Image (spheres, rainbow, N blue to C red):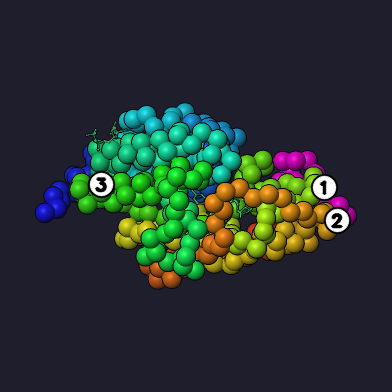
Amino acid sequence: HQATKPPPSPSPLRTAKFFQSNMRILVTGGAGFIGSHLVDRLMENEKNEVVVADNYFTGSKDNLKKWIGHPRFELIRHDVTEPLLVEVDQIYHLACPASPIFYKHNPVKTIKTNVIGTLNMLGLAKRVGARILLTSTSEVYGDPLEHPQTESYWGNVNPIGVRSCYDEGKRVAETLMFDYHRQHGIEIRIARIFNTYGPRMNIDDGRVVSNFIAQALRDEPLTVQAPGTQTRSFCFVSDMVDGLIRLMEGENTGPINIGNPGEFTMLELAETVKELVNPDVEIKTVDNTPDDPRQRKPDISKAKELLGWEPKIKLRDGLPLMEEDFRLRLGVNKKI
Ligand code: NAD
Ligand code: UDP
Ligand code: UDP
């Protein structure tokens, strides 16, 4: 017998919306790469008030500098593994390091962020009657035995490897989301995000697109990790933000894959960056890290059908936009 409780009553803030139509939105991890682009988009709507909670582990206030001091914006230094008391209508829960070098740096903390952090945000959602969206990941499919990956695939994840703090952490976070939904009637949304790139990525955060562009601009060899035939599918950040907002505003809990199905080997990616950014740069093969998934490509039929969403920006069009941002930040002019 499953004990299903009725949904919690709307928060006073939501009821107050009949009188005052502002929507107060919490973005955890809003000082990070995807989070800060999401904040930009949410702030464009004058009816939104945005509260960001971030501990600045991999994010930075710099990403939000244009909003600091804005009357509809608030920035809180907060670690989501601690309880948070705010009154909001929606929660975009992104807080979690996303780059392997950062999430492996302190794996126990990564698990706490995913598990205790998500539990706290669900407790908050329950108390105030807010809708909550979790940014889960394609890593829940592990080293997938199904290709492309559909949402119904349960995955092939090593529970005890060096990536497990992230992969299994996100899997538990998804479980918590569904248990709060079933047990407490919380309105949930789960996005399974595939590799995303774009301006504002941490220059030295170790992810492949940021590495290759920074290396090309610094005239350093592009480091393709062996064998180089492993694939990823890269989504430009503006498409990602659009998908996340559609998911939050729509009626489907998910999980829904959000990503760009254009699939490339890491060697192809290196060749493309070389061609577009610096034709003189060398490409070299270096050692890989354990448990690197061999292939990854989203099946986005569900996102197309249920959200009316599909990515618009091809890799070849997105890379130059990122190059421009990296040139500015690294102070490297384009050769004429
Ligand atoms: P990011 O590292 O740039 O941003 C994460 C943000 O969360 C940072 O600002 C960081 O300081 C903050 N943070 C980390 N731990 C925290 C904690 N305990 N308390 C409060 N804040 C904390 O990463 P991103 O690429 O913007 O990713 C955002 C979300 O999307 C993450 O949940 C990530 O797992 C997910 N995701 C990203 C990708 C991708 O390719 N970028 C792919 C799959 C999933
Ligand atoms: N929580 C929070 N903010 C709130 C409400 C709850 O951070 O506004 C945290 C709370 O500290 C707890 C977690 O969310 O650790 C889960 O809360 P819930 O009420 O579901 O569980 P309980 O407190 O009964 O364990
Ligand atoms: N990779 C690479 N060179 C780098 C960094 C990463 O070839 O300098 C490869 C890595 O082995 C993996 C892919 O690029 O196969 C994507 O790695 P990333 O860390 O960007 O994201 P992941 O999808 O593994 O989380």
Quadrant location of the N terminus in the rendered image = bottom left
Q: Which mark is residue 235?
A: none
Tag 1 and tag 2, C-beta contact below 8 Å = yes
Disc 2 marks which residue? 280
Residue 95: horizontal and vertical position, in percent? 45, 40
Residue at 49% over, 31% down: 55
Residue 39: horizontal and vertical position, in percent? 49, 44
Disc 1 element: loop
What amino acid type is highlighted by mark number 2?
Asp
What amino acid type is highlighted by mark number 1?
Asp
Disc 1 marks which residue? 219
Rounded to the nearest angstrom, the CA distance separating label 3 from label 1 is: 50 Å
Query: How crowded is the residue under tag 3: few (<14 C-alpha within 10 Å), some, or many (20+)?
Result: some
User: Viewer-proximal residue, 57 or 239?
Assistant: 57
Q: Is mark 3 within 8 Å of ligand 2?
A: yes
Q: Is residue 73 above or below residue 229?
A: above
Quadrant location of the C terminus in the rendered image = bottom right
Residue 236 visible, this angle: yes
Question: Which image quadrant is residue 279 in?
Answer: bottom right
Q: Is residue 173 above or below residue 295?
A: above
Q: Is residue 212 left or right of residue 68?
A: right
Residue 10: horizontal and vertical position, in percent? 22, 44
Residue 59: horizontal and vertical position, in percent? 55, 37
Disc 3 marks which residue? 180
Disc 3 element: helix
What amino acid type is highlighted by mark number 3?
Tyr
Rounded to the nearest angstrom, the CA distance separating label 2 from label 3 is: 54 Å
Q: Which residues are magenta?
A: 324-336
Rounded to the nearest angstrom, the CA distance separating label 1 from label 2 is: 8 Å
